[in-house]
Image: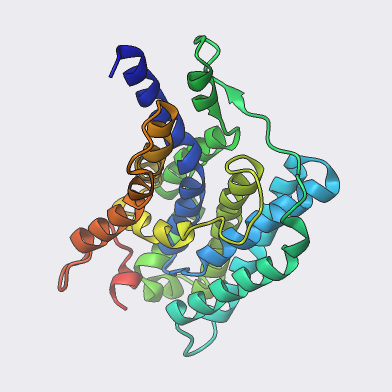
Amino acid sequence: MTADAILTLVVAILGGALRVGAPFLFVSLGECLTEKAGRINLGLEGVLVLSAMAAFGGAYLSGSAWVGVLVAMGAGAALATLHGVLCSLPRVNDVATGIALMLLGMGLAFYLGKPLIQPQAPQLPPIELGAWSSSSAIQAALRINPLVPLGAALAAALWWAFANTRHGLLVRMAGDSANATRALGYSVGGIRIAATAAGGMIAGLGGACLTLFYPGSWNEGISSGQGLIAVALVIFARWNPLRCVVAALLFGGAGAIGPALQSIGIGWGYHLFNIVPYVLTLVILVLSCRPGQLAAGSPGELSAR
């Protein structure tokens, strides 16, 4: 392998990590916020698929990709709010409700999105980071999703807010001790509904990444389980928003290995490399979720269940 081929491969994997990891980043940040408040939302797969369809439909009907982004955020927030409200009812289980909402979100997306499979919608304008190279492969690899810097800024803002703001403290308190939160006169249910809704809105940005940038079209299998993988990402990140960025890049890079190899003419093992993110998910869950042990950083209310 020549030096140029190695450079192209490395740049392709790095660019692919940013491109493929964008949905992972937003969904994991949304789940991190939700779980910090003491609630699990396994329905994020449905949120991701529904917001992806909503983003594509909004962009197609309005002629603006940015309108599609706003529609995706609204769709994600709406479905997540439903999850939050249902889970606030007596004797309702978060996990069972999340699975039901996942099926509802996917069903709605598949039904409403049937007319959107063939049309093309406006796409988000890329940030061009490869202008320094004359290689078309490197230029293509370094076309960055404009939502990625927003995701990095959002991760930093969440990390800062959890440590330094009153609202961040209330979210953490609701997640660590519901009794202490009630004793101070705050509504645990209200905090968790708000955090779940905000988490769904953030996850909606991940759906917009799928249909308005990469792969840039709408079809029923577009998410490939990324909403569920996000739960493992949050565990891997130890409920730290900044670590969610690293985890998303890791999973994005794993998912980009196959296309990166193809970019330099290596086609063998392409489908094998496509399973790397799922293998990583299994490894993380096995290493992080050991019987009788609590994962470091886990909110107290989640550990008590």
Where is residue 121 shown, x and y percent of the image?
76, 44
Where is residue 283 shown, x and y percent of the image?
23, 57
Q: Relative to 269, is 115 on the left or the right?
A: right
Q: Is residue 296 visible?
A: no
Where is residue 75 shown, x and y percent of the image?
68, 61
Chosen colour scheme: rainbow
Quarter of the image with the N terminus in it:
top left
User: Which of the two residues, 213 or 270, is positioned nearer the viewer here?
Assistant: 270
Quarter of the image with the C terminus in it:
bottom left
Residue at 44 percent across and 28 percent down: it is 263
Residue at 54 percent across and 72 percent down: it is 102
Q: Relative to 275, is 146 on the left or the right?
A: right
**Image quadrant assignment for residue 40:** bottom left
Q: Is residue 38 visible?
A: yes
- Of all residues shown, which one is farthest toward the left? 292
In the depicted structure, whether residue 158 falls above or below residue 239: above
**Image quadrant assignment for residue 79:** bottom right
**Image quadrant assignment for residue 164:** top left
In the depicted structure, whether residue 284 falls above or below residue 93: above
How many numbered badges does the structure rendering display?
Answer: 0
Residue at 30 percent across and 14 percent down: it is 2
Where is residue 64 shown, x and y percent of the image?
79, 40
Residue at 48 percent across and 68 percent down: it is 41
Q: Relative to 237, is 193 on the left or the right?
A: right
- Of all residues shown, which one is farthest toward the right? 62
User: Which of the two residues, 293 or 226, is positioned nearer the viewer here?
Assistant: 226
User: Which of the two residues, 204 or 38, is positioned nearer the viewer here?
Assistant: 204
In the depicted structure, whether residue 292 falls above or below residue 231: below
- Of all residues shown, which one is farthest toward the bottom? 91
